[in-house]
Image (cartoon, helix red, strand yellow):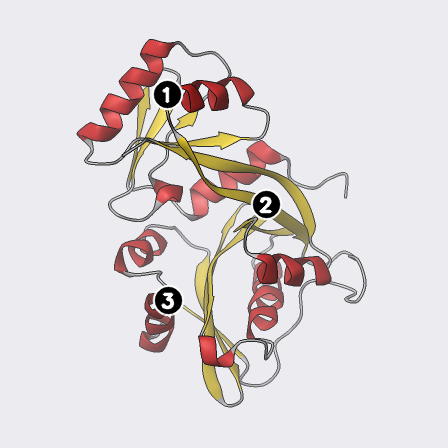
Amino acid sequence: MSDAPDLPRLFAALDATWPAARRIAQGPFTLREGQGGGQRVSAATLDGEGFAPADLAAAEHGMRALGQVPCFRVAEGQEALDAALEARGYGVSDPTVFYAAPVAAPVAAPVATLAEEPGPVSLFPIWPPLAITADIWTAGGVGPARQAVMARVPAPRTSLLARVSDRAAGAAFVACDGPVAMLHAIEVLPGLRRRGAARILVTGAAWWAQAQGAAWLALAVTRANAPARALHDRLGMVRCAGYHYRVAPG
């Protein structure tokens, strides 16, 4: 796994396949206008290592001018930024870890490759998404503002609709940034969980990504999401470095 994408490459793919409505340079920080699309498209990030208290204050002001609560994405290794935000009263939100695996090269047992061609009528890669796909996302909290993020992503991109027990059961979104395909917005209807829909979405995303010429499938999952992490472990995906958010008090 020595050729696995490193953390900067994973962040680049994350930003390219789940983009903010607008990015704004603010001193050593990049601000993001999320338009209600969640922390991933609204958090500021530090470019490089150095910053001053005045830089933090300017970034905070810039985010408030966008109508957003100040929020920073802190990568592993950014201890100085993390400490500075903690001292300003920022709380930790959504510790997250990246997973990645080659789509076709051998990975850990019990699967020989991550990419699997879906069985008949088990997975539908379709863009734009079907209405039932949008409904599944909305039911899982991936509402119109987050679905608007997907619409901003350039091709290659697709929605995925998984079926189990002859019913639409799960949805996801996947897009490519060069050799890295990033999987987002995995949602399975509560009444149809533990029937293999999430596995179909992940392995089917790898199958789709392979057809687009991507070499790697990656995704970001919160550390608290134990069922999802267990699935990725079983599929042989490798845990990479991670990040968390710091959100302003109040």
Q: Residues within 10 Å of mark 1 (few under 14, many from 20)?
A: few
Mark 1 to mark 2 CA distance (whole Å): 27 Å
Amino acid carrying label 1: it is Arg
Q: Earlier in the sequence, mark 1 or mark 2?
A: 1
Front position among marks 1 and 2: 1
Q: Mark 1 highlights which residue? A: 88
Q: Mark 3 highlights which residue? A: 137
Residue 25, given in percent of the width and then of the height, sits at 32, 22
Dot 1: what SS?
loop
In front of the other: 69 or 51: 69
* Residue 108 at least partly seen: yes
Residue 113, given in percent of the width and then of the height, sits at 74, 63
Q: Mark 2 highlights which residue? A: 98
Mark 3 to mark 1 CA distance (whole Å): 35 Å
Residue at x 29%, y 16% (from the top left corner): 57
Amino acid carrying label 3: it is Trp
Residue at x 67%, y 46% (from the top left corner): 239
